[in-house]
Image (cartoon, grey):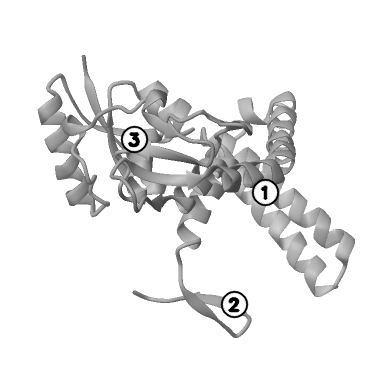
Amino acid sequence: MIYYIYRIPRTNKIGCTKNLKERVEEQQGCFNYEILYKTEDINKASDKEIELQKKYGYKLDRIPYNKLKIHKMEEIYQTSGTTTFKSVFEKSDFKTYYSDLKKLDLTGLGTVKVNNDIFNFIESKLKKSQYNDLGMYINNATLWNYYNANKEENTKQNNMFDNIRQWAKDKGILEKGDSKTQYIKLQEEAGELAKAILNNDRPEIIDAIGDCVVVLTNLAALEKLKIEDCINSAYNVISKRTGKMKNGTFVKENL
């Protein structure tokens, strides 16, 4: 068995896995990564992961790879009111143990399909229990209400990006296209947007913004990425930023 240490530049992540396709490509939706190290020794892999995280200045894993317990669905404790994720005592533990979570059957409510948005929502709402040391929990009703309120919109959004990618595939853009030419195309569309804004031409503003999204979707696909994952990655960063408005723009606070 071979253990791989991989790096995803866009997310500043260095991780360890036995299966690159399942862990990185299928679960994380990333194809633009590099292999930094590989070994058949799990202890060497674990030590190297920490060493490289320090070298690149990335966040260190709280639990070394060789000490991880792979948590399964049966290790989620549920009542009629809450869902508790065992051994999750800090929110950052949720990604460590439950990155492969696909669905949750909420007692008396129904099944929640876990995509990136739902996963991030669960993580943001986790609370520490005052009564036991099982782990952190989320209120079932809170999750269920959010899931249903956003289910239709998320489905429409995902279908929209899928439709764009299918169109690009049909037109040969994904087979014969090039990221550099798509970037040039993006600059052209941005210029059209600037002109529309200066002319206060609302129909053209709408059209130009849509064109920019289409080009960005194709550009991401050519880089073996999904634009949805790029958006989620960016949101996870900006959602934690602090700052203030200055001269009509948001200026982040330098920490």
Q: CA distance from mark 3 to mark 1?
A: 41 Å
| 78 is higher (above) or lower (below) than 145 | above
Could you tell me which quadrant the N terminus lies in?
top left
Residue depicted at x 28% and y 44%: 133
The mark found on residue 185 in the picture is 1
User: N-terminal of the two: label 1 or label 2?
Assistant: 1
Q: Are marks 2 and 3 in contact (CB under 8 Å)?
A: no
Q: Amino acid at mark 1?
A: Lys
Location of residue 24 by image quarter: top left
Q: Could you tell me which secondary element the residue under label 3 belongs to?
A: helix
Residue 249 is tagged as: 2
Q: Which of the labelled discs sits on residue 97, or is there none? A: 3
* Frontmost residue, 142 versus 8: 142
User: In terms of secondary structure, where does tag 2 sit?
Assistant: strand
Q: Position of residue 255 (x, y in %)?
A: 34, 74
Q: Is residue 185 left or right of residue 95?
A: right
Q: Does residue 197 appear left or right of residue 218 in this picture?
A: right
Kindly identify the amino acid type of the residue bearing the numbered disc 2.
Thr
Task: Tell me the crowding category of disc 3: few under 14, some 14 to 19, or many 20 or more residues within 10 angstroms, Cα based.
Answer: some
Residue 237, visible in the rendered structure: yes
Look at label 3 and name its amino acid: Tyr
Tally of numbered tags = 3
Q: CA distance from mark 1 to mark 2?
A: 26 Å
Residue 8 in sight here: no
- In-image side of 71 versus 174 (left or right): left
